[in-house]
Amino acid sequence: MAGAIVLMSVGVWLRRLLWFAPKSRRPGTGLTPMDIRRQEVYDSFAPEVEARTVMLGISLDDAFEERSAGRHEIAWRMILLSAAEWDGMAKIVTGMLAVLSKHLPGAQVVVTPRGIRSHPFKSKQMVDYVRMHELMDQLVFSSHRRFQLQLRLLRRAAEIVTGEFRHSCRQVEKTGDPSGEVWKEIDLYFHDFDLIAKEALLAFRALLVCLPLTVLPQFSADLNALLYHRVRSRPVSVTS
């Protein structure tokens, strides 16, 4: 009886603690605020990635619209043109994740990564892959180690979904028949790729708030070296 009372008391205390905590610091609500210098690093890179992902989505949407209008040959040519943009985005996303892995050991505090779950993904390949990761994630307790595994998951996921997209394109080039099933697969692959890019940016932000100020210039330089022919204006420089 005494043990039960103690447990109930602790539960009530924790509930009150979470309730009266500032909203920005409650579990699962909002993002950790960034100071000006970290915001500069984020703004010099993340919006460019977001803009390129949107542009890729628009290109693919245009191809789907051409197909709906019955202009199948033009539609497929647009898919092939979008493939070059996709490859460029895949290199940026995987490169970003490699930079995060490089700088992870320099994090000042323990990084608590946001868990990645399988249910938001739509392609069978990604659902199966992320489900396997969910099982592994339950066996790892170190926050740094979990974050490292998450970066590997995202990098491999980007490679998988990009490979599947390329495979679909090659199959159509061989057969000359872009069936409805192929178009459906491409739609699912881009949905998952877009989700991977967003998760990668969340990981970037999570690590950014944990790095010491002294490494920010090099961190920013490593990230911005991945970008060529920017679609947005040049970023402000990050000083040491």
Image (cartoon, rainbow, N blue to C red):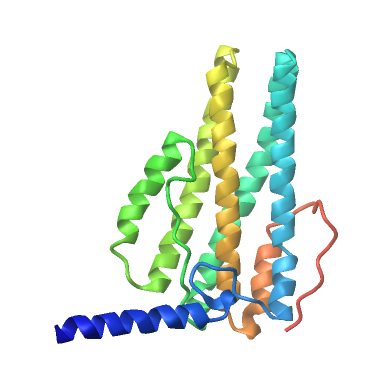
Instruction: Write the residue at 46% across / 49% down.
Output: 156
Q: Nearer the viewer, residue 238 or 130?
A: 130
Q: Residue at x 59, y 24 (%)?
A: 183
Q: Residue at x 82, y 71 (%)?
A: 236
Count of marks overlaid on the render: 0
At 52% from the left and 83% from the top, the residue drawn is 108
Q: Quadrant of residue 38?
A: bottom right
Query: Where residue 158 appears, x then y in whole percent?
Result: 53, 46
Q: Is residue 117 visible?
A: yes
Q: Position of residue 138 (x, y in %)?
A: 31, 61
In the picture, measured across the screen, residue 146 lies left or right of residue 139, that is right
Q: Is residue 77 visible?
A: no
Q: Nearer the viewer, residue 73 or 206?
A: 206
Quadrant into which the C terminus falls = bottom right
Q: Quadrant of residue 148?
A: bottom left
Residue ranking furthest to the right: 233
Q: Along the horizontal axis of the image, is 59 left or right of 173?
A: right
Q: Quadrant of the N terminus?
A: bottom left
Q: x, y percentage for residue 130? A: 40, 48
Q: Is residue 180 above or below residue 38?
A: above
